[in-house]
Image (cartoon, coloured by chain):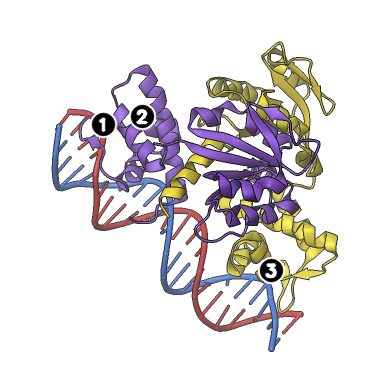
Chain colours: A yellow, B purple, C red, D blue
Amino acid sequence: MRRIADSTVRRLSLYLRTLEGLEKEGRATVSSEDLAEQGGTTSAQVRKDLSFFGSFGKRGLGYAVPELAHRLRDILGLGREYRVAIIGAGNIGQALMRFRGFDQRGFHVIRVYDRDPAKVGCEWNGVVVQDEEELDTDLRADPVDMAIIVTPAPEAQRLADRLVEAGVKAILNFAPIQLRTPDDVVVKNVNLALELEALSYGLRHR
Amino acid sequence: MRRIADSTVRRLSLYLRTLEGLEKEGRATVSSEDLAEQGGTTSAQVRKDLSFFGSFGKRGLGYAVPELAHRLRDILGLGREYRVAIIGAGNIGQALMRFRGFDQRGFHVIRVYDRDPAKVGCEWNGVVVQDEEELDTDLRADPVDMAIIVTPAPEAQRLADRLVEAGVKAILNFAPIQLRTPDDVVVKNVNLALELEALSYGLRHR
DNA sequence: CTATGTGAATGATTTCACAGCT
DNA sequence: AGCTGTGAAATCATTCACATAG
């Protein structure tokens, strides 16, 4: 299959969220127009996005809500549960440990690491912070599907290397650096200071 | 000036971070090639990005590190301090209150609101959580430059409306919905569950 | 001789517009 | 009649390649 743009994948997530709301309301069908409205895009964009993966609608009618939701979950790989490790138990790391939104969507934080002895042993949500030294042997013995790096920038690359070495294939990186990883490792970045800088730019230039 | 792509603005932030590192090391000049390497892009991309705003380099030599850093801060609007309000003192909201990275870059969290009486009055980093009811009159009396929405999705749109009404022109939205705001309000979204879903997609399709 | 700045070329994404199903 | 699915067109972003300046 053709390579799908990241922007398309992200919109599919948004459509899915809308569909899950409609499912709860018991709505049977939805039009590309409705999905576009909620997703902040256009109906043509919705139809094009979906068309990369098949034709799921009925002309003149729209899309069956539960069926399209199911298809999108399948496309996004959400038909399973994921095991997640958090690397770094600082502010953001702790917040993510407590965050309910992940579990609800099938992403289970099962392990947290930090190198600060003061943090090792602390528990939140039933997960105990472990020493970073144990990371490598640990992950090899009992792998995770994804890792979230929430450490200061200077440590991030070295930790990413260790994660990759231990077989991790998906990393969500909060450190404000560009990680270097092999091609078969998926990396997404969240950079909070950068978002504020983008807002700053937006304030001046519009 | 021509409308600049969001992706370009984000790369400028990355270049600036690299430059600040080089400034500390005392490096005098840098080439587009070096900047590209750190920013995970190409030298042509770096030069094109910069060319939208002027010509800051010297042919045969590269860019003067302190000067280019200064220019980028200016372009991004970082020559000033920003006053930021956080709306929602849950997990993520509290983590952001404590986060050091914002202050360092000139973004000062001066106010936090929550509607939960149990949270009102709590203090972190010298900022006391205030009742959400006070938000409107407060912001009109003593405005902020940016707001960060960190509430559950169902409340987010209503709060965005109140913020806009109170004159806020820049919003960083962590709620997993697409906010509707007037054209003169800048909105950036951070959607953590969506990032994990994008990773999930990436794991299956590569 | 080196590295920028930039039109021109290529590639990617979005929008248009309409044929074709239900 | 209504709404999808999709080529074709338009727009937008990246890469190329080279003339130009130090």
For label 3, the residue is A34
The quadrant holding residue A159 is top right
Q: Is residue A191 left or right of residue A60?
A: left
- Residue at mark 3: chain: A
**Residue drawn at point x = 81 percent, y = 21 percent:** A123
Give residue B102's position: percent from left, percent from top.
Answer: 54, 31
Tell me if residue B3 comes above or below residue B41 in the rendering: below
**Residue drawn at point x = 72 percent, y = 12 percent:** A118
3 and 2 marks on the same chain: no
Give residue B121's position: percent from left, percent from top.
Answer: 74, 33
Label 3 secondary element: helix
Q: Is residue B201 left or right of residue A5?
A: right
B165 or A176, which is in the foreground?
Answer: B165
- Residue at mark 2: chain: B
Which label sits on residue B62? 1
Label 1 secondary element: strand
For label 2, the residue is B34
- Residue at mark 1: chain: B
3 and 1 marks on the same chain: no
Label 2 secondary element: helix
**Residue drawn at point x = 48 percent, y = 31 percent:** B105
Q: Give the CA separation, mark 1 to mark 2.
A: 10 Å
Q: Are marks 1 and 2 in contact (CB under 8 Å)?
A: yes
